[in-house]
Image (tube, rainbow, N blue to C red):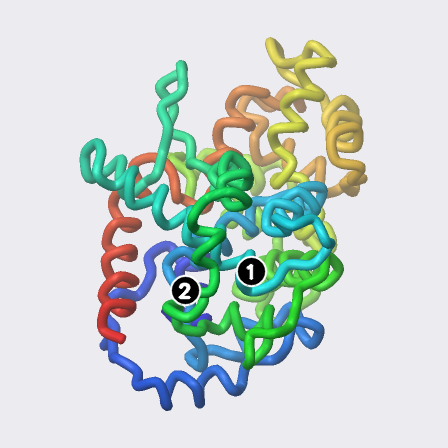
Amino acid sequence: MTPYDFILAVTTDEPKFAKTWKSLSKQELSQMLSETPPVWKGSSKLFRNLKERGVISYTEYLFLLCILTKPHAGFRIAFNMFDTDGNEMVDKKEFLVLQEIFRKKNEKRETKGDEEKRALLVLKTDAEELVSRSYWDTLRRNTSQALFSDLAERADDITSLVADTTLLVHFFGKKGKAELNFEDFYRFMDNLQTEVLEIEFLSYSNGMNTISEEDFAHILLRYTNVENTAVFLENVRYSIPEEKGITFDEFRSFFQFLNNLEDFAIALNMYNFASRSIGQDEFKRAVYVATGLKLSPHLVNTIFKIFDVDKDDQLSYKEFIGIMKDRLHRGFRGYKTVQKYPTFKSCLKKELHSR
């Protein structure tokens, strides 16, 4: 897939499958990748600037998806898992060895279970809820394997067999000799999150500095299993008759909070509010304790107006957490994922096999 394909996959309701896939010669691929900037020149417009001038492998696609839902506090953990020799730098061999481990684990999972479970890469919890298997979980369990397995011994073979991609050139240079430090890795992950949020925000702002509270509600409810969104949208229209608008900084801070949803849920449990509705002050306090983020009063009020079904200025903990978990994973969990993810995956494989 191309950088533009990836942007479409995570910012539109349905990826555009009606696309003519083509194979690339080594010369064409080399020419395409020559336009990839080094990681230290990265920006929050990297994927938009590259558009169709790049290639992303299927395993890298999973890696990028996980970045979108990773809290900033987890960036160091992610980097350390790639840095298998502990020298505070990640080279191309280390990156590819763990990519290969994840690919092999993925292939083993695909030989078990039905087609839907294979496409989703999911686990069943005690509550019978479908939860995405984390890319990082697989890498964390297998970091020691990377250090001692025959894969590490065959690192040179893996490197020589894998074709360069936009991500590999961006991280390790055209010759593959550069090394990735934590600062550049952190900046890349932060830029990717920002770029996707900017695209979503700009699709509603129409060139303005804010989006309406109703548009904010639309964005929150995308990729969720909420069938009757009209109820929530009506809440906003009724409760906020005079539009003030949500700025991009507020928009971004909310999704940074969303990436820390598990910690937020723990904080609420500690406050013993999980069994009942909570007010705005408790909500703001729990967000700050869990994430260190201070959400603006207007943003918090807007969130409450969206989800305040009973009009009592209280937030239903279970309903809010359930809906936001769907939104966090951008539809790549539950029944909606079953419909589009296998098809998208097959398109990716078709493109990769045609090279």
| Quarter in which the N terminus is drawn | bottom left
Front-most of 108 and 14? Answer: 108
- Above-or-below relation of 351 to 329: below
Residue lying at 72% horizontally and 26% vertically, measured from the top left? 283
Q: Quadrant of residue 320?
A: top right
- Above-or-below relation of 244 to 314: below
- Left/right of residue 33 with respect to residue 335 in the rendered view: right
- Above-or-below relation of 114 to 27: above
Q: Is residue 248 among the parts visible in the rendering?
A: no
Amino acid type at mark 1? Val
Q: Is residue 111 among the parts visible in the rendering?
A: yes
Element type at marker 2? helix
Front-most of 84 and 338? Answer: 84
Amino acid type at mark 2? Asp
| Quarter in which the C terminus is drawn | bottom left
Spatial CA distance of label 2 from label 1 is 35 Å
Residue lying at 25% horizontally and 46% vertically, measured from the top left? 339
Mark 2 or mark 1: which is in front? 2
Element type at marker 1? helix
Front-most of 346 and 111? Answer: 111
Residue lying at 52% horizontally and 49% vertically, measured from the top left? 219
- Above-or-below relation of 353 to 342: below
Residue lying at 56% horizontally and 51% vertically, measured from the top left? 67
Mark 2 touches mark 1? (CB < 8 Å): no
- Left/right of residue 47 with respect to residue 127 in the rendered view: right
Residue 98 location, x and y as percent? Answer: 49, 51
Instruction: Write down the residue under mark 1.
Output: 196
Label 1: how many Cα within 10 Å (few below 14, some 14–19, many 20+): some
Residue 157's disc is 2
Residue 276 location, x and y as percent? Answer: 62, 11
